[in-house]
Image: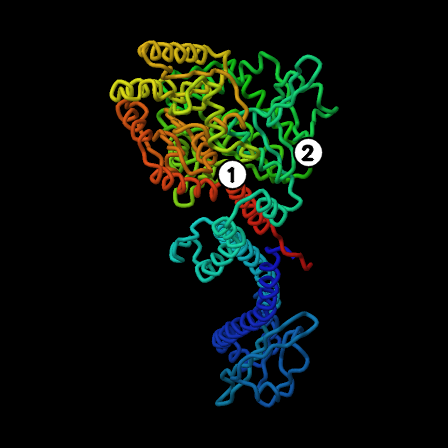
Amino acid sequence: MRLSLRFIIPLLIALALAAYATVPLIDQQMLSWFSRDLDARATLVANSAEDPVLALVNSGDNAGILGYFSRLTNDERLYAIGLCEPGAVMPIATRDMPPQYDCASVRRKVGSPGELVHTGHGLLHVAMRAIAGPGDATMALILVHDMSFAERRSEDTKRYMLVFFVALGAVIALITVAIAQMSWRGWVTGLRALLRGEGLFRPAGTIVVPELAPIARDVRKLVRDLESHYRPRDEDQLSWTPAALRSVLRGDMQGNNVIVVSNREPYMHNRRGDKIEVLRPASGLVTALEPVMRACSGTWIAHGSGSADRETVDAHDHVPVPPDDPAYRIRRIWLTPEEETGYYSGFANEGLWPLCHIAHVRPIFRASDFDYYRAINQRFADAVVEEAQRDDPIVLVQDYHFALLPKMVRERLPRATIITFWHIPWPNPEAFAICPWRNELLDGLLGSSILGFHTQFHCNNFLDTVDRTLEARVDRESFTVTREGQRTQVHRYPISIEWPPEALQDQSEIPVARKTVRERLGLPDDQLIGIGIDRLDYTKGILERFSAVDRLLQLEPQWTGRFTFVQIAAPTRGMIDDYRDYATRVAKLAAEINARYPKARHPPIVLISEHHDTRAVYEYFRASDLCFVSSLHDGMNLVAKEYVAARDDEQGVLILSQFAGASRELPEALVVNPYDADQCAAALHLALTMPADEQRARMRLMRALVRDFNVYRWAGRMLMDAAMMRQRTRLLAYRPPSHN
């Protein structure tokens, strides 16, 4: 039974009973009122007719009496009239006088209230009044009034009362249902808000719907119990491993369809001669997500950029990976050179990348680039819909290449749980306002169920940007944004690396690695080495790093010839002018610094501009005395965490830029301002002279953090939040069975 009928039917029954009881009472009351009126009228008529009737009786003119009575009955109300003379048996009466009235019965009733008589004509009112007779005698006057008008009015009154009660019932029903609906909606809205976690920690007095106040505490407890099903494993998990993550997924997300969307693929196939080689690109994103996909299974949608990628896919553009032990599959998306230039090189990396990093490179925005960006986002969104095996998949959207995609998927799969992770910084509102399509980008991102950033600072910047740019409700207590009915949670999820790192397997011992690397570089065994591992990107602060090395040698000349800084700089985005110019400037500065120290036995800087696989990178980490991360602006920077993970000997010093997100998690590093060359030079000197015990103490603390807060925890937190959100959605969508 519908909710409205539950209100209306009892109300109508009550009104029907009230009408059934009320109408007869009103009818009787009206007849009583008319009877009293006719009694008074009968007295008036009798008083008026007394003298004429007495005169006619004294003259003995019975015919005159009847004539006089006939004239009186011309009154529409006076139906009949009769006279009982002294000693008479039957009255002298007009022809319509009811026959049951003889003079004996009339004399007994003289002066009594009139009585009602039902005849063939209808309802009559009969009143007996005494008038003066001959001498001292009295006579009785019988006055019969027609009461049919009263019956007609009674019927009209009944109809009016029926219409009144029907109208009253309709009005009351409408008002009741309207108020009930508004109350119910308010109640449901408040309950849904509590179930979503809004105001979870607010006192009950702040509940907007007063009726919710008595149960608010119970509902909050229910939500906390729901959260406790997930949170303790995040907070109390002693060891986040692939097995632990798989346990979470199998327990909380069994049967869920997991899809990852990123521009870069975790494995690419390249042709070399007659052979096809499988490469795993060196990428922080791939480093973070590839172990997750091994644990989750599912589909990874990415741009197929390898020279042999098309040769290795099936008819649906799928390829199982990893090649040696397939655990998930890649769905490759093909881009033309023009599309890749516009979408990737253009809008994503010439526009959004410098905009978000605030790295003193002017963002470039072209309408044609944004058209490509929108089209490629739509193509990837279509692929998500095609790969979805159910209407509520879990979609993990990665990075700034797909800001429009969450909303596109939401429009096609409204029940999907979309987790978007923004791997780069989010700028302040003033900086983001530079983008001509800022509204479209924000709308796209707010199609997400959960939007993640590395740091709370970036979360705050995003909320500020939305608040200043869009018409949306921003709740800074629960860190949520509600836009056009879609609610997005904005959370901090600091990314990390796998633990233990796969690249550490089969690594040589530290002394062996030191000897191998020094021989490779042509350096003596006692040469102190610093390491930098980066893409050739202007946000990484490579120029500032080299300037710091130069300043060290100026301030501390004893390190000339004894210390060499090795910079591995992987070429990237060579089709963009700013990147080509930066690569040229890096090589030029390295050569200039080396030229300043001609007497040094070994060059202060060794620049290696080529790609290295993860195992080779870890060997350099293990062979170095320090690692210098000088990012000018970085979301997290996993190189810092990889260096810590590589040092299982608990030696080595990490110098870390304050503008890298990792600096908020690794305070035991030597945190510096990369723009301050003197401060960076001092940190280099401190690192080179730091006692082994202090190195061990610092490294031990950092390794414990990287171990406990590893990539499996990063993914587990997001996926458990998704599971909790999906459970809440099921609670909100629940409809009790109908009992019609």
Q: Confirm whether residue 674 shows in the render.
A: yes
Q: Residue at 74% of width from left, 25% of height from top?
A: 314
- Please tell me whether residue 10 is drawn above or below residue 543 in the rendered image: below
Frontmost residue, 499 versus 345? 499
Residue 287 lies, with reference to residue 599, above or below; the image says below
Mark 2 crowdedness (10 Å alpha carbons): few <14, some 14-19, many ≥20: few
Nearest the eye: 227 or 365: 227
Specify whether 297 is left or right of 446: right
Which quarter of the rendered picture does the C terminus lie within?
bottom right
View extreme (right): residue: 315
Dot 1 alpha-carbon crowd within 10 angstroms: few under 14, some 14 to 19, many 20 or more: many
Residue 74 seen in render:
no
Quarter residue 557 falls in: top left
Q: Residue at x 44, y 43 (%)?
A: 704
State yes or no: discs 1 and 2 in contact (Cβ < 8 Å): no
Disc number at residue 646? none
> In the rendered structure, which amino acid carries the disc numbered 2?
Pro
Measure the C-alpha gap from mark 1 to mark 2: 20 Å
Indicate left or right for 680 with 519 as reference: left
x and y, in percent, of residue 84 in the image: 59, 84
Residue of label 1:
711
Q: Residue furthest front?
A: 525
User: Could you tell me residue 734's position as x and y percent?
Assistant: 61, 52
Circle 2 residue: 326
Q: Quadrant of the N terminus?
A: bottom right
- Look at label 1 and name its amino acid: Val
Where residue 469 appears, as percent x and y from the top left, is 40, 29
Dot 2 falls on a residue whose secondary structure is: loop
Between residues 340 and 437, which one lies in front from this camera angle?
340
* Up-down relation of residue 280 to residue 59 (above or below): above
For marks 1 and 2 on the same chain, the one whose residue lies earlier in the sequence:
2
Q: Secondary structure at mark 1?
A: helix
